[in-house]
Every structure is written in structure tokens, then in C-alpha cells.
Amino acid sequence: MRQKIIVIGYPILHRLALGISKKLDLLHNIDIVTELYDPFLNNINDPEFISKELPGLTSDSVLVAADRCAVFLQENYNIPVIPVKFSGYALMEALKKARKYLDNDNDEVILVNFYKEMEEVEKYKNLLNVKIRQVVFKNHEEADVIFSGLKRAGKKVVIGGSNAVDTAKKYGMKGILMYSGSAVENALVHAAEILQAIRRETEKTERFKTIIELVHSGIICTDDNWQITTFNHAAEKILGIRAPKAINNSIKDILPSINLPQRPNQLTARINKLVSTGRINIFLDIMPIVVNDNCTGVVFVIQDAGTIQKHEQEIRQQLHQRRLVATYTLTNIVGESAAVRKAVSEAKSFGQTNSTILITGETGTGKELFAQSIHNISSRHKKPFVAINCAALPETLLDSELFGYEQGAFTGAQKEGKPGLFELAHTGTIFLDEVGELTPPLQARLLRVLQEKEVMRVGGRKIIPVDVRIIAATNRNLWNEIKAGNFRQDLYYRLSVLELHIPPLRERKEDIPNLAKSILRKSMSIIDGFLIEKLQLLAMNYHWPGNVRELENLLERFAVLSKDRPNREEILCAVFRDSIKGKKTDIPEDNSLCEIPVIELNSKIKRMESNEIKRLLEEVNGNKSAAARLLGISRSTLWRKLK
């Protein structure tokens, strides 16, 4: 809707306004309306008429009227009215013209006003040394009576507004307009500026309303008396209250469980405050609106706690289902051996780059743990981490999983197609586990992705650019695979820009106690330190072909079998014996693990126990209760061992 300036007056004022509007660029997008509101002149004494709304007025319109008419409108209607201002200079110009029609200097000049006299004229009387008499009319009948009397009195000239000038002409008198063209122009410019301000405020208000209604959080605003001024749709849904019932009511009535001060200026901001409404629990943010150090209102942001929990659970479930998150960090890597410290140090350095990494190591050494940790310390840590086991899928499926497929690419394909893992990993990291299992055709496609940073879906014709960091892992010796013709040499060099080797468990047996504690802590509330030492002694002559994963399996079986049973040492020995059957070990096959070796182990363990107990008792100054706590055993067990 176009904005309007409605000019109220008679033809002379209309012609001036229209002529000026054509010259002002400011008014090109504004309609100048010059309809005459005759009822103003004939009904200003009628209270019933004045109480009615003026026709044709909208929020996008401003009135412009001559000085006295503007006064009438401002006093009787709550609407914006810009007066065409009377000025001393315009009066002097009008008097100068009027003198030409006076018989002598003692004749008085008649100033005809609508509605009220002009107080300002009295200021100029003495300065101008001219006799000025003001007369006032309030409707057409009064105007006719006044001008008829002036004619009979022999008056030849009057000064006034556009109505007075037109009426003077009707009675054969000279009418001189008391408003200059510049006064009309100033009024129009002022009106246009007001309309611009109204438009800006309207746009700002509508923008604010749109934002308020679009957000999923409930937004409630109050004034400085706690009266609600804004109550969005989300607040209606969360609280089960319609906005019309909330607006203009106190927030204390809507949310009585909130502990609010007497006045908003006593309020301090609160974030994530959990509040019960009686029906639901909500998270609440409260923020005062401060203008010039004064609190003019308060904003309340509410969220349904149940909905937040539900959404968070759904998001986490979706991310984990799609394997788009990395959960491990370098703090999850257990071990203090030189081999592990070297691997961790290299991983930290590699994490600061975007280069491709090849992680090598035997099965069960924790290659994915290192891959996730590197991603989580990299600049891509907030982006997706996508992992795929290249050995777990057949070639046809692996191709479509890695690169995606278009609609109808093959029988059984989803109707809308599917993005590949490289697309899902865009801006993040893709982890290709067991990369040595890729077939030659897939190796060629992977090489192209590394070279060109782009993929093409199966059955597609469109090139899709991708920005991913590739971390590959293998338990094979890829150089031997290259010699055997099973792996591309050019792909190997692309993948092994940075190479990280994860040591097998047999090369870091000193880490077994800490690994065991970390593993058992997940399933056992109390971990017997002596069991850990026995496990270390048992494990020294075993090669651990399954590495840390094998240790995890062994300890999980032990935790299940030893639950609530006192003979944990025997159970650990039996589980270990069953675990190493048929595997490479330096333990003599003709000796029972639970006989001679265990006797020797028990002797070593008893000596360790004795030394450890003595050392701890010295540290705690003989306090047996403190020593028992440090050893992870009961006070009675400590007494028995001391005996």
C-alpha cells in the first residue's frame, strides 16, 4: 500500500501542494491527496461529529493542513497532522501587499482566521506599526456573516488562509494568502519524513514479529510493570495458553513459580533456569531490557525440557546411526610406554595438519581410536567424522556407499537416490578402515577423489566437489601388497603422506596394568591391585595376537565369571589359560598354568604384597584403615595379610 499525504484545505492550498510535490524527489513515491473535507468547516461545534473517525485515514497516511485547521485537528483527533506554519516574514509580505489597497495608513488590516485567533500576531503588531484586527469563523455560515459585514464596512482587502481568500473573492474583496510557498513545502517535506519514519518503524515491527513467530522457543516480553506485551506462538504451544489471554496480564500470573522481584529494575539475568509450571518443566532464560541504565522491560525465553531432551536424543541417535561423530580423544589412549608416547606425540602433530594419514597396525591395536582422536584435535573437529570398514561390504555396495548413487541407478536403489559417505563427510574427515581390502577398480576411483577433490555418484553425470580429509588404516603391509600386484603404488603414495604406526601389545606389555584397570573399571566397582599384578605376570610370556581387543575380551569374561565370587585369582588363571589355548606363547605346553607357573607367580605376588603393604603403612604412619583404602581391600583382609 502506497503512503498518502492528505492535504486539507481549499483549492489555493491544493494547487500549491500539488505544484511543489512535482518538484520534490522525496514525494515521488507518496500520493498527494487533495480531497476537501467540508465537514470540518460545518460541524466543528458538533460533539457527535467530532467523536467519529475521519474517513480515508490509514496508518500509512499523514494530514497536512493550514495552521488553524491543523490546531483543530490536533485538539480533536489522535492523528498526525503537520501544520502549514504561519511566519512573521509571510505576514510582513502579506501586509506589504495589503497596504496597496488601503485608503490611508490609519486603516486597519483584517486578518481572518478559522477556528482560533493567532496569538503570534499580537507580537508583530507593535513591530510593524500596523493596525491589525483578527476575526474568527467556525463554519461557512459564520464566514458569510463576517465577510458580508466587512463588505458593508467598506473593507477592500483581507489576509487569511485559502478559505478566507476564496470567500473574499466571492464578496468582491481582495484576499491575500498569509502562507508562503516555502511554508507549504516545509510542511510536505516534514510529512514525508514522518511517513518514512512510520515505514521504517512498521518494517522493524513486522521484522521483529516474524522473527519472534519463527523461533521454536517461547518468547514472552513484559513492560516495566511485569505486564505481558509479547506472547509468541511457541509460548502458546509450550504453556497451553492463548496469546489474547496472556497479553496485558502479569507474567507473575502466567508463571507463578518464577521467583521475581517487586520491580524489573531489581532483576538480574538468569540463563537455563529449570522451572516447573505444574504441568511441564521448562528451561527459562530471563534478560532485562536496559535503556540508559533504566529497565524498561524483560524478555523471557522458554523451552520445554522434555522436548529438548527428546530432540537431543534424536540428534544423537541419528548422528551415531550415520556414524558422523568422533567420540574418542587422545585422553582415551591408555599407556605410558615409549612406543605409545611416540605414537601419541606423532598423532598430536598430525592433528594440526590437513594432510592424508595412513595408520598401520595389527588388528585390535586401536587404529580407529587414534583416527577419531586426530579428528578431534584438528581444525575439522566440529565437522562430520564418517567411518567405514572397507572389508565389511561387497564391492558393489561399497562403491555406492562411498560415492552415492542417483535415482534408478540399480535395482533396489532408493527412489530419490542417496549421497555417498564422501558427500556426508564434506568439510570433515572420512576414515577408511581396512583400506587394503579395496578392489583395484575402487582403488582407482579413490585415487581420483584424492587427486581431484570431487566425486561422481553411481549412475550420475554430475561432478560433486568435496572437501574431506582422509585417514586410512590397514593391518596389511601395503608395500608387500604392491609387490604382489594387489595394491596401486600411486594410491599408496597418496595415502601415506603422513604415516602413523600403532605398536602391538606385545611391544608395550608394561602398559597392561593400566589397560586392565581402565577396562575393568567399566564393569567392576573395586579393582584388586594384586589381581592386576598377577595378570601382568601371566601376560609377560604371551604374544597377544589380538592385541588390546583380545585383552578387553579376556577381562570382560573374567569380570562376568568372577562377579560376587571370592576366588578371583583362580578364575583369572583359568580364563587366561583358556584364552591362550592353541596360540603362540612361551609358556611350556606340558606345564599346567594353574600348577607350577601359578605357584611361582604366587610366591612373587606375596613378596610384592608384603613390600607394598610395608611401604603404604609407612606413608600413612601405621594407620591400617587408610592403608586398606589405598590398597582397595577391607580392613579385615589387611589384618589377615599382615598375619
Image (cartoon, rainbow, N blue to C red):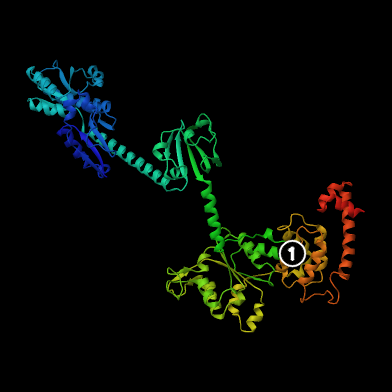
Q: Quadrant of residue 117?
A: top left
Provide residue 630's location: percent of width, then percent of height. 82, 51
Is residue 24 at least partly visible in the picture?
Answer: yes
The answer to whether 47 appears left or right of 540 in the picture is: left
Provide residue 109's location: percent of width, then percent of height. 15, 20
The answer to whether 114 appears left or right of 416 in the picture is: left
**Could you tell me how many numbered marks the image carries?**
1
Decide which of 470, 619 is in the foreground and name it: 619
Quadrant that contains the C terminus: bottom right
Extreme residue in the bottom direction: 484
Provide residue 168's location: percent of width, then percent of height. 11, 26
The answer to whether 527 appears left or right of 40 in the picture is: right
Residue at the location (77% across, 73% down)?
580
Decide which of 552, 121 is in the foreground and name it: 552
Provide residue 639's location: percent of width, then percent of height. 89, 51
Residue at the location (22% across, 21% down)?
116
Q: Mark 1 — residue?
A: 555
User: Judging from the image, what secondary structure is the residue with disc 1 in?
Assistant: helix
